[in-house]
Amino acid sequence: MRQKQKIHNSLPVNIDEEYRILYERKSSYSCPNLEVRKYKNVFVSHEGLCWKNFQLLPYSTFNINSSYDAKHGWEFYRLVTEQYLVSTFGTSLKKITLPKNKTYALIHTKWFNYSFWMTSSLVRLRMLYKQTDDFTLIYPEEWDNIAYIQETLRAFPNLKIEKIPAGVHVQVPHLLLPEVRPFTACLNGDDIKDVSLFIQNFFEKDFATISTTPKKIFVNRKKASCRKIVNSDAVEQAMKKYGYEEVDFDEMSVAQQIDCMRNAKCVVMLHGAGMTNMMFASPKTKVLELMHEYTEPRTYRFIYWFLSVQMGCDYYVQFCKTIDTHSDEWRKDILVDVDKLEKNLILMDQGV
C-alpha cells in the first residue's frame, strides 16, 4: 500500500463568505509518497508520455492516477498509443531507439510551462540525484531555447544529456522514472522547499550583483498575449498610492525573479505561472492573488493558494470579473474592482 501524506491549507486571510465553501472543499488533499521507478523497454513520446504494454505508466504524468480531472487520462492514452503505432509501423512519425548500455531518465510531461518546470521537473530531478547520478537525461531539443530551463540546469553541472529532435519519439531500453504527483495542484511543501533552497543556494553568488529590490511589488502581465488586466491604468495608480512598485518577470532572469520575491514583503499578482515564484518568498510574506471569477466551480485551480500557504505566506485573494476576450475561459482578460483592491491593500498593510 502506497503511503500518503495529508496536506491541509489554511483558508485565505480575507476569505469572502460566498467563496468559503469552495475553499473549504479544496483545503485538504493527500499526497502519495513518490518514488523513482525503473522500467525496461518503454515508449516515450516527445512530450513525455510513457507507454508500455498498451498502458500509460502509472504516475508518469498528471491526472491519470486521480479523479481530479480524469478525462486527460483517456486523451493522453489515445494520443500516445497512436504515436507508438504510427512511429513503429508507419512512416509519418519518427522514432529512435536509444542504446541499451545506458540508463535514461525523464523529468518532463505533456503539462509543461514555467510552473511545471519549477514545481515538478526540478523536484523530479532532485529525486533522481538523491538516488543516483548514473543516468542520461532525455532532453527535448527545444529546451535549448527556453531561458529558465538553461539557467536552472546550471545547478546540475555534471548532468548527462541526450537531445531528442523536435517531434521525434523514443524507445527506451532502460528508463528511470521519478514519479509525477497525481494532479497538477497536488503540491507537497517539503519537496518545493527542498528545490527552493537548492536553487537559491546555487544563485547566491548572482544575488550580490542584483540591485536592491522593492519590498512591495505588483507583478504585471503587460507582455502576455492573454489573461491581462483591462483597467490596468487604474490598478497601477492604486498600486502606486499604496507604495507598490511594478515589476515584469518576463524581463528578468531567474536569479532576478528569485531575489525580487525573497526580498518582498507584500506581493500582488494575477493568477498565472509567474506566481510560481512564491516558492522563493520568505515566510509571512503577504500575497494577494487576482483570481478569475468562473461560472463553473470545477474550473478553479488553487495551486498558488496551496503554494503560498505551504511556503508560510499570508495568502489573500480577490476575485475579478472576466471579460469576453477569448473563447477559452482560462485565457480571458479580467476587470479589477479598484475599490475592493484598495481595501485588500489596506488589509495587507494592517496584517489583518
Image (cartoon, rainbow, N blue to C red):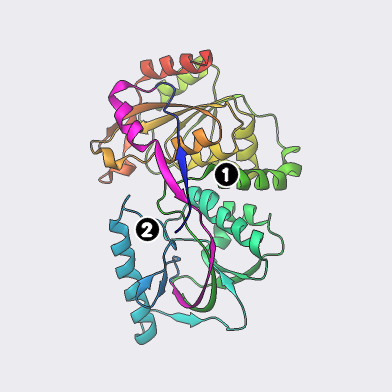
Q: Which residues are magenta?
A: 15-44
Viewer-proximal residue among 135 and 166: 135
Element at badge 1?
Answer: helix
Element at badge 2?
Answer: loop
Would residue 2 be found to the left or right of residue 75 on screen?
right
Would residue 250 be found to the left or right of residue 152 on screen?
left
Tally the marks: 2
Would residue 86 be found to the left or right of residue 287 on screen?
left
- The residue most toward the left is 295
- Disc 1 packing (10 Å; few <14; some 14–19; many ≥20): few
The part of the image, by quadrant, that contains residue 25 is top left
Percent from the top left, x then y, of residue 194?
Answer: 62, 46
Q: What residue is at 35 percent from the left and 25 percent from the top? A: 336
Q: Residue 175 has which mark? A: none
Residue 31 colored in magenta in the image = yes
Q: Is residue 181 visible?
A: yes
Quadrant holding the N terminus: bottom left
Vertical order, 58 against 41 (above or below): above
Q: Label 2, on which residue?
A: 65
Q: Label 1, on which residue?
A: 190
Q: What residue is at 44 percent from the left and 61 percent from the top? A: 59
Percent from the top left, x then y, of residue 228?
Answer: 39, 36
Vertical order, 182 against 305 (above or below): below
The part of the image, by quadrant, that contains residue 54 is bottom left
- The residue most toward the bottom is 89
Q: What residue is at 39 percent from the left and 44 percent from the top? A: 225
Amino acid, disc 2: Asn
Report the Cα–Cα distance between label 2 and label 1. Answer: 21 Å
Amino acid, disc 1: Asp
The part of the image, by quadrant, that contains residue 252 is top right
Viewer-proximal residue among 8 and 269: 8
Vertical order, 216 against 102 (above or below): above
